[in-house]
């Protein structure tokens, strides 16, 4: 199964001609998941090879405008371009994010008299007081939403922190386990871990043919875990004929933060194939980054090192850092951010990549569990 990430916006604070506001899409066969949706994300979709109409899940890391202002407009644009079939109604779009997201969408859609041709459900993560300074916490009045759903809204879950794992359990289906973990920012922020479940290895067909077993129903029985008795009387079990299992891939996307909280991020992101982390300012601006609740390349690298990630992708750059092909004399050099992260990760084997708008990063499948 193919899997890749496409960055639609890699800039901080606001969209610019050089960098869109935060948004990226994780794409697998049959699934298109959007992480954050800053202002202008729908335009970035139109400039890319992706189709907004295929988005079936949305994950919002925090409620700052450069991560959420594009969501109401995107939902409306998806609706305008839908051509639903009577015998196949559109599926519900599941949206995950902090407390307050449900009310934000209700108010935006209600005041603009927006009607959607599909249903949606908002699943809110309960925040903790230590995720942001006092001034960043939502007031009780804002944080309390009434029970009146938007006409296309379906009831969503309120997800509590699992004290045993220090994570939020969002999804656990046949293909994926998705968790969220707490981060510290100027408002409550989260990161997300998407882990593909382990797959059984392939049948060793060469071995089966040598044993005189021809392709057919018996192959299917072995693949499904049943035993098969050969004419010689030998009993073949699944473990005899399956190659080593295929380890699932893991992708982790961090929201804005100046630090992690607790051990949740390590548990959720250990051994990540790709870890996406903000690096808003260079290391020389460390104090300014902290004051604004952000990270530098060295801070992002330290997180990747703690998680033993294979690849660290830096994004959410200050708009002062133009993409390298557009940089002119006197402009801040974005490649310095990669060098600063690489210095921390030297000898670890972790690759560092600078994200740019419309970069698509394939995530290859591991051959077996030993890799």
Image: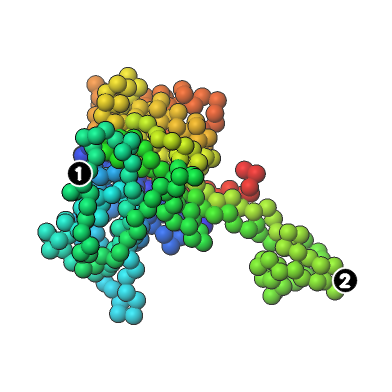
Q: Can residue 47 be seen?
A: no
* Residue 183 image offset from top left, x and y in percent: 36, 37
* Residue drawn at 44 percent across, 48 percent down: 162
Residue most extreme to the right: 232
On screen, residue 307 above or below 298: below
Between circles 2 and 1, the one closer to the viewer is 1
Would residue 78 be found to the left or right of residue 114 on screen? right
Q: Which residue is mark 2?
A: 232
For the residue pair 217 and 164, the one nearer the viewer reads as: 164
* Residue 226 image offset from top left, x and y in percent: 71, 69
* Residue 217 image offset from top left, x and y in percent: 69, 75
Q: What is the crowding at mark 1: few (fewer than 14 residues within 10 Å), some, or many (at least 20)?
A: few
Residue 139: numbered disc: 1
Looking at the image, is mark 2 or mark 1 earlier in the sequence? Answer: 1
- The quadrant in which the C terminus is found is top right
Q: Secondary structure at mark 1?
A: loop
Q: Can residue 88 be seen?
A: yes
Residue most extreme to the bottom: 87
Inter-mark Cα distance, 2 to 1: 75 Å
* Residue drawn at 33 percent across, 35 percent down: 130
Count of marks, rendered view: 2
Residue 26: numbered disc: none
Q: Residue 50, located in which quarter of the rendered image?
A: bottom left
Would residue 235 be found to the left or right of residue 138 on screen? right
Q: What is the crowding at mark 2: few (fewer than 14 residues within 10 Å), some, or many (at least 20)?
A: few
Name the colour scheme: rainbow
On screen, residue 49 above or below 286: below
Q: Secondary structure at mark 2?
A: loop
* Residue 137 image offset from top left, x and y in percent: 24, 40
* Residue drawn at 54 percent across, 40 percent down: 271
* Residue drawn at 44 percent across, 29 percent down: 301
Would residue 183 be found to the left or right of residue 248 on screen? left
């Amino acid at each position: 199964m193919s899997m890749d990430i496409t960055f639609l916006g890699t800039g901080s604070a606001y969209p610019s001609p050089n960098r869109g506001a935060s948004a990226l899409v994780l794409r697998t066969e049959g699934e298109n998941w959007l992480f954050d949706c800053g202002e202008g994300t729908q335009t970035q979709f139109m400039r890319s090879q992706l189709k907004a109409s295929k988005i079936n899940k949305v994950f919002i890391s925090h409620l700052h405008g450069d991560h959420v202002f594009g969501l109401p407009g995107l939902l409306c644009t998806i609706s305008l371009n839908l051509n639903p079939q009577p015998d196949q109604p559109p599926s519900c779009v599941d949206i995950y994010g902090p407390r307050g997201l449900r009310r934000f969408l209700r108010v935006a859609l209600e005041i603009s008299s927006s009607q959607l041709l599909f249903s949606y459900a908002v699943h809110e993560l309960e925040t903790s007081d230590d995720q942001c300074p006092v001034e960043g916490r939502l007031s009780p009045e804002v944080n309390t939403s009434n029970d009146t759903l938007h006409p296309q809204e379906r009831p969503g879950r309120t997800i509590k922190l699992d004290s045993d794992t220090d994570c939020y359990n969002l999804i656990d289906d046949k293909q994926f386990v998705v968790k969220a973990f707490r981060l510290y920012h100027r408002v409550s922020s989260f990161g997300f871990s998407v882990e593909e479940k382990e797959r059984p290895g392939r049948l060793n067909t060469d071995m089966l043919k040598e044993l005189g077993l021809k392709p057919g129903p018996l192959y299917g029985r072995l693949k499904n875990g049943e035993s098969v008795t050969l004419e010689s009387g030998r009993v073949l079990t699944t473990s005899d004929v399956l190659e080593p299992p295929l380890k699932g891939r893991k992708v982790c996307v961090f929201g804005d933060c100046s630090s992690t909280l607790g051990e949740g991020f390590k548990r959720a992101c250990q051994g990540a194939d790709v870890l996406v982390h903000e690096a808003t300012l260079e290391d020389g601006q460390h104090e300014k980054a902290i004051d604004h609740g952000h990270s530098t390349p060295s801070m992002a690298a330290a997180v990747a090192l703690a998680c033993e990630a294979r690849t660290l992708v830096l994004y959410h750059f200050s708009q002062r850092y133009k993409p390298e092909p557009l940089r002119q004399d006197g402009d801040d050099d974005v490649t310095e951010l990669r060098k600063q992260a690489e210095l921390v990760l030297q000898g670890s084997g972790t690759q560092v990549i600078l994200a740019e708008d419309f970069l698509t990063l394939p995530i290859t499948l591991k051959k077996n569990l030993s890799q």
